[in-house]
Image (spheres, grey):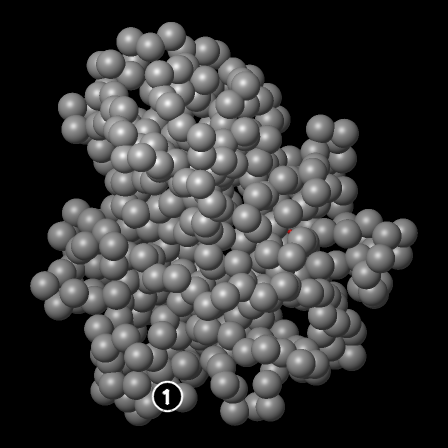
Amino acid sequence: MVRAAVPRRLTWRVATVVDTRQETSSARTLVLDVPDWPGHLPGQHVDVRLTAEDGYTAQRSYSIASAWPSDDGGQVELTIQRLEDGEVSPYLADVVAKGDQIELRGPVGGWFVWREKQPAPVLLIAGGSGVVPLMAMIRARGLARGRQPFRLIYSVRTPEDVCFADELRRRVRDDPGLDVHFVYTRKAPEGSPVPPKRIDVAAVNSHGWPPDFQPDCFVCGPTSFVETAADILVALGHDPKRIRTERFGGA
Amino acid sequence: MGIISRGFGGRRRDSSPDLPPGQYLTHDFPVLSAGPTPRIPLDRWSFSIVTETGEKHSWNWDEFTALPAEEITVDIHCVTKWSKLGTGWKGVSLDTLFEDVESAADYAMAHSVGGYTTNVPVEDLLDGKAWIAYEFDGEPLHPEHGGPARLLIPHLYFWKSAKWVNGLRMMPEDEPGFWEAAGYHMYGDPWSEQRYHGD
Ligand SMILES: Cc1cc2nc3c(=O)[nH]c(=O)nc-3n(C[C@H](O)[C@H](O)[C@H](O)COP(=O)(O)OP(=O)(O)OC[C@H]3O[C@@H](n4cnc5c(N)ncnc54)[C@H](O)[C@@H]3O)c2cc1C
């Protein structure tokens, strides 16, 4: 197992929202200006802390969506999917606005990260908002002009729920080293030859890499999705040591 | 106190004196681990304690489940902020396993199938504070939750309660395990919110 660099003390920093982008009807990206941001690796996350007027606080983890070093002056982007009955995500996805401040600390995590020096092909498997840290890896590879071939299998309810849809389309068009395959679980696009279904062995087998290519696999999403996808990879013969997972919690 | 987040009220659905600071109550059982879930056949399962002099004590599944077991009801706290109160387990106390082990080491590294490790002070393993648990809620421990058997150290954040545990290596000096080397706290007391280095 890899050892991360010597850990630093993680302090809370005040981040200012400098821009927001609606990704889908339920997901929004916050562009944050964080003074003295130390940089991060694609796949790492931050802890966000919100404080109410009476001092009540809530903390949640959010993956970093942007690559580092970024081409936009060291800003950090988070992409948040609203859970209707959630405590923190509706605030970040709907309420917080340009000029507001939130606190965060990080980057956290040294395991679920892609390092551009790793020569292996990469298989990314995302369920819902689990695409966020994988998008950071795709962006980092683009920025570094990495030659490792990447494949993304992205499971999503309907075509309208695809985050980063335009950017993914553009990247696939301009970059022969990147492939994206969508698995629609509730509604497939018009004219799709396959009906909506959950991720299965066939999808991973036909759109992933064969195990003998020894790809690095990154699986991220809700707990049960990650469980299923990681089991499929093991069943197909992938080396468990090359399968890294990040579970966002929930069903 | 932190800066105020304009317009944030919070839901505060779960205040309870049993919850450490920053934790929220969950009723399901979230799964967190760094890789796929290993499935370990019982006839290939073993657990061992290796002392600082290299002496090895090990138990296979039959030997292990023949040891006196305890039923434990405890609260558990994950560093990702969920807590679960009053969870029921069955397992073998570390006091039982250490009966014939001679060691003066102050620390132990727990090792798991798949390469996961986590460090624990020995005094946090003894005196009825820790178990190797193999049942949850009266059922064999599910592989997702670390079955056949996991370490259970309820008074520390749950990343210390190594899933799929297969051994302890006694260490004279403290060394970071898997998450600790990645920036998590060396000890991990939920009541002091020892999440990351420097907390
Ligand atoms: C490492 C990591 C990275 C993550 N990255 C991202 C990311 O990039 N983007 C993203 O959108 N999310 C991400 N998440 C998930 C995120 O941290 C939050 O869990 C998510 O936003 C939900 O938080 P919330 O406060 O809105 O919901 P919560 O209030 O925490 O509720 C979550 C769900 O649990 C249920 N629930 C909670 N408490 C109770 C209760 N007491 N009774 C009944 N039901 C309850 C709610 O109904 C809801 O459906 C990540 C998680 C982790 C661990």
Q: Is residue B54 above or below residue B68?
A: below
Foreground: A48 or B13? A48
Foreground: B123 or A172? B123
- For disc 1, the marked residue is A144
Residue drawn at point x = 22 percent, y = 14 percent:
B62
Q: Quadrant of the N terminus of chain A?
A: bottom left
Q: Chain of mark 1?
A: A
Residue A172 screen position, x and y as percent: 31, 84
**Farthest left residue?**
A212
Foreground: A183 or B151? B151
Task: Please say whether residue A32 is visible from this viewpoint.
Answer: yes
Residue drawn at point x = 75 percent, y = 59 percent:
A50
Q: How many numbered discs sit on the rendered protein?
A: 1
Residue A17 screen position, x and y as percent: 71, 77
Left or right of A41 on screen, residue A175: left
Figure quadrant of residue A204: bottom left
